[in-house]
Image (tube, grey):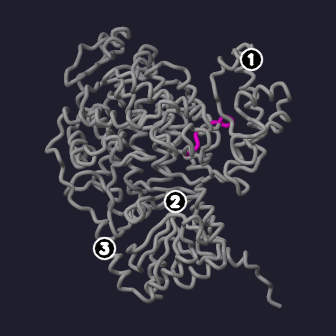
């Protein structure tokens, strides 16, 4: 007798079961006959004369989960998809090239975008309809997915000419067009105008009550904050510093920050940073750590150093693979509910902390019977500083601070027994580059050895597992498999990390690798006709269009990061070609920057460097020596965003540096003592062996 095979067991045969992406694997048991993105799916669509449905999302996306449960796990929806369409699942983090193309379509057709992204294509990959989340049936004015599938199938059968005309027009609109620059060449006066205009735009949207920019939902956007710190250094405008400080502190004190286990959630659904979208992304941790470190450098305030320490505690504890790479994200949902892992009731707190300590903890973190979230549950957040809270209670502030921290650690251990959200454990080269940069900067500013170690291990991981024998970087690693030729972000962000790690350790190999990968990036991605860098390079899969982005959204763009990399490498190596590339890139996007510079704040950071003044600092001496170390620390701990730092030791390492940066050839220790050479504005000061004099030169 044939053994009965359940529907669930049959569904495991879905084509996604052999993929590595956690997002694709989440759909491996769907009744939908999913294909991964690839030639097989497009061949099948042409063979069967069916349109293609593409669903794009990522493993920790809440509304992706909702649509999956409502529609993709539903037999009625699966039946329609399987009968009338060839269905493709795409992980946007593995294939950002595919996501970018079709997200542009969605935004052009609907005026909005987001995930899940739902796109209908011809068998040739040309889009003719797009949207985001669709409920299974019509609800709250949103078209139902079942009706949409039926209508689309009918149009494909009965009005093919309209579909093909629409798809051709949309595809034509996606093609890159000439974007004439509104400036001939870059001059400092233009750069200053953009910086000033960008600052003014941010100031007009700043929320003076709760911090942040614009109305709810509010996003962290750390490059806004790093730009504001640079504007403060340039102008002394106190408001720019106030905006950065207010926003960082408000985010740290709110529910956007995980008060129990540390780390930032993705964004806040309200204007006061209380209720977050609970997923945690690696890139947010990296970028917010860097913004906090710079705020600490500017202000000297311990609160900003603490934020960085807490972020690194979370990342090194929960987001680091045994081999050294960093995982991508943690989900918002657990046990089918968003935020369940992170919320508390007074009864739970009292049970584990006792009545007295529990009462203080609940009062301080606003954990109440009524709750500040769903179903009487509370998101811990800080409504006032510990000092003010202790004064109200008539208690000693230090004792209260110790009590709260001890209680937090107890509740953290309790929380570890809960069902955890899914961890997206793929390792992305680009996001690892950001975290390498953050940890390296953390080591420079805070001096914590584990941060340097974490950055170094991650670099070794990328170079061992995510670099082909021919030197080409790869995008993603998971479970022993590396895949997909790297994109612009992978190159630019990883080079960023290498440069910061060189300025932390002064191991010449990091600088050599940064130079090599930057040269490779230019060969693979540079637009020889119009300037700037394409997102996809030679060796990436050709798609229906080739995007070239500069907008700095949740992540800074690859072009913005590359511009600053070019400038740093130009100053580090003395090669003017890198500086020319930064200028050509900026000119290529000048029209967009002029219209709305606040949309390009990471690029404004590069422009701030380009405008100058910038400093080139070379210290000749043994990096491990006490006197040399003192000089290095003086440079690292000051807020000098437009500087490069080279250390020339004696011996082979020093000779290698001379080959990379010939201008250091004549720089040597004076009287055998560690010596600092400081140049600014193409003029060099007399070398000094005195740390106090170096401090004056840096100021």
Tell me which residue sits at (36%, 28%) in the image: 230
Of all residues, the one furthest to the left in this rendering is 184
* Mark before the other along the chain sequence, 1 or 3: 3
* Image quarter of the C terminus: top left
Q: Is residue 273 left or right of residue 587?
A: right
Q: Could you tell me which secondary element the residue under label 1 belongs to?
A: helix
In this view, 183 is above or below 667:
below
- In depth, the one of 592 and 185 nearer the eye is 592
Q: How far separated are the C-alphas under marks 2 and 3? A: 24 Å
**Quarter of the figure with the N terminus:** bottom right
Give the alpha-carbon distance from disc 1 to disc 3, as whole Å.
67 Å
Is the magenta region chiefly helix, strand or loop?
loop
Q: Is residue 405 left or right of residue 352?
A: left
Q: Nearer the viewer, mark 1 or mark 3?
A: 1
Among the two numbered marks 2 and 3 on one chain, the one whose residue lies closer to the N terminus: 2
The magenta segment is: 259-266
Find out whether the residues at labels 2 and 1 contact each other: C-beta distance under 8 Å.
no
Residue sitting at 36 percent across and 68 percent down? 543
Residue that appears at 51% across and 37% down: 455
Residue 13, quarter of the rendered image: bottom right
Q: Is residue 98 something one can see in this rendering?
A: yes
Q: Which residue is mark 2?
A: 115
Q: Which residue is mark 3?
A: 169
Dot 1, crowdedness within 10 Å: few (<14), some or many (≥20)?
few
Q: Which residue is mark 1?
A: 393
User: Would you place residue 40 above or below residue 636 in this image?
Assistant: below
């Amino acid at each position: 007798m044939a053994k009965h095979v359940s529907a669930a067991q049959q569904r495991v045969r879905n084509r996604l079961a052999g993929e590595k992406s956690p997002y694709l694997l989440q759909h491996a048991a769907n009744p939908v006959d999913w294909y991964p993105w690839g030639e097989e799916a497009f061949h099948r669509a042409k063979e069967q004369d069916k349109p293609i449905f593409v669903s794009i999302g990522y493993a920790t996306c809440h509304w992706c989960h909702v649509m999956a449960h409502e529609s993709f796990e539903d037999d009625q929806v699966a039946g329609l998809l399987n009968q009338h369409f060839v269905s493709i699942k795409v992980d946007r983090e593995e294939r950002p090239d595919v996501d970018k193309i079709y997200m542009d379509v969605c935004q052009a057709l609907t005026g909005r975008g987001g995930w899940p992204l739902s796109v209908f294509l011809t068998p040739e990959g040309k889009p003719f309809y797009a949207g985001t989340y669709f409920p299974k049936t019509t609800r709250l004015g949103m078209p139902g997915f079942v009706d949409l599938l039926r209508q689309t199938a009918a149009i494909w059968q009965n009005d093919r000419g309209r579909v093909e005309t629409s798809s051709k027009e949309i595809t034509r609109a996606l093609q890159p067009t000439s974007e004439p620059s509104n400036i001939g060449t870059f001059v400092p006066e233009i750069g200053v105008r953009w910086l000033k205009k960008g600052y003014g735009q941010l100031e007009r949207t700043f929320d003076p009550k709760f911090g942040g920019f614009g109305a709810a939902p509010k996003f962290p956007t750390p490059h806004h904050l790093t730009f504001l710190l640079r504007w403060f250094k340039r102008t002394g405008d106190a408001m720019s510093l106030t905006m950065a400080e207010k926003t960082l502190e408000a985010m740290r004190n709110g529910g956007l920050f995980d008060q129990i286990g540390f780390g930032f959630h993705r964004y806040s659904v309200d204007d006061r940073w209380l209720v977050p979208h609970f997923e945690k992304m690696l890139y947010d941790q990296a970028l917010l750590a860097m913004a906090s470190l710079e705020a600490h450098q500017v202000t000297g305030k311990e609160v900003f150093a603490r934020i960085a320490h807490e972020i690194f505690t979370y990342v090194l504890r929960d987001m680091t693979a045994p081999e050294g790479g960093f995982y991508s994200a943690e989900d918002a949902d657990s046990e089918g509910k968003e935020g369940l892992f992170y919320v508390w009731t007074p009864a739970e707190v009292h049970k584990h902390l006792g009545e007295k300590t529990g009462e203080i903890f609940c009062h301080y973190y606003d954990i109440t019977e009524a709750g500040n979230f769903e179903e009487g549950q509370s998101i811990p957040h800080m409504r006032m500083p510990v000092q003010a809270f202790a004064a109200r209670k008539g208690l000693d502030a230090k004792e209260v601070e110790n009590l709260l921290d001890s209680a937090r650690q107890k509740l953290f251990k309790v929380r570890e027994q809960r069902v955890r959200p899914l961890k997206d454990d793929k390792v992305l080269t680009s996001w690892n580059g950001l975290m390498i940069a953050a940890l390296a900067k953390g080591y420079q500013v805070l001096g914590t050895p584990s941060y340097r170690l974490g950055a170094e291990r991650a670099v070794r991981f990328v170079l061992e597992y995510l670099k082909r024998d021919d030197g080409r970087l790869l995008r993603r690693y998971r479970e022993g498999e590396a895949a997909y030729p790297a994109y612009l972000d992978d190159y630019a962000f990883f080079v960023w990390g290498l440069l910061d790690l060189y300025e932390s350790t002064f191991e010449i190999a990091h600088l050599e690798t940064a130079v090599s990968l930057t040269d490779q990036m230019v060969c693979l991605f540079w637009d020889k006709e119009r300037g700037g860098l394409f997102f996809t390079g030679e060796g990436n899969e050709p798609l229906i269009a080739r995007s070239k982005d500069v907008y700095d959204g949740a992540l800074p763009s690859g072009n913005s990061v590359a511009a600053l990399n070019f400038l740093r490498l130009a100053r580090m190596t003395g090669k003017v070609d890198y500086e020319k590339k930064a200028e050509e890139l900026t000119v290529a996007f000048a029209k967009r920057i002029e219209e709305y510079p606040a949309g390009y704040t990471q690029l404004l950071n590069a422009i701030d460097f380009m405008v100058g003044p910038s400093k080139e600092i070379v210290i000749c001496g043994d990096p491990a020596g006490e006197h040399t170390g003192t000089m290095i620390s003086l440079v690292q701990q000051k807020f000098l965003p437009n500087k490069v730092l080279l250390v020339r030791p004696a011996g082979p390492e020093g000779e290698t540096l001379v080959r990379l940066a010939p201008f250091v050839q004549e720089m040597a220790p004076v009287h055998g003592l560690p010596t600092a050479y400081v140049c600014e504005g193409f003029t060099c000061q007399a070398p000094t062996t005195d740390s106090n004099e170096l401090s004056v030169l840096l100021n």
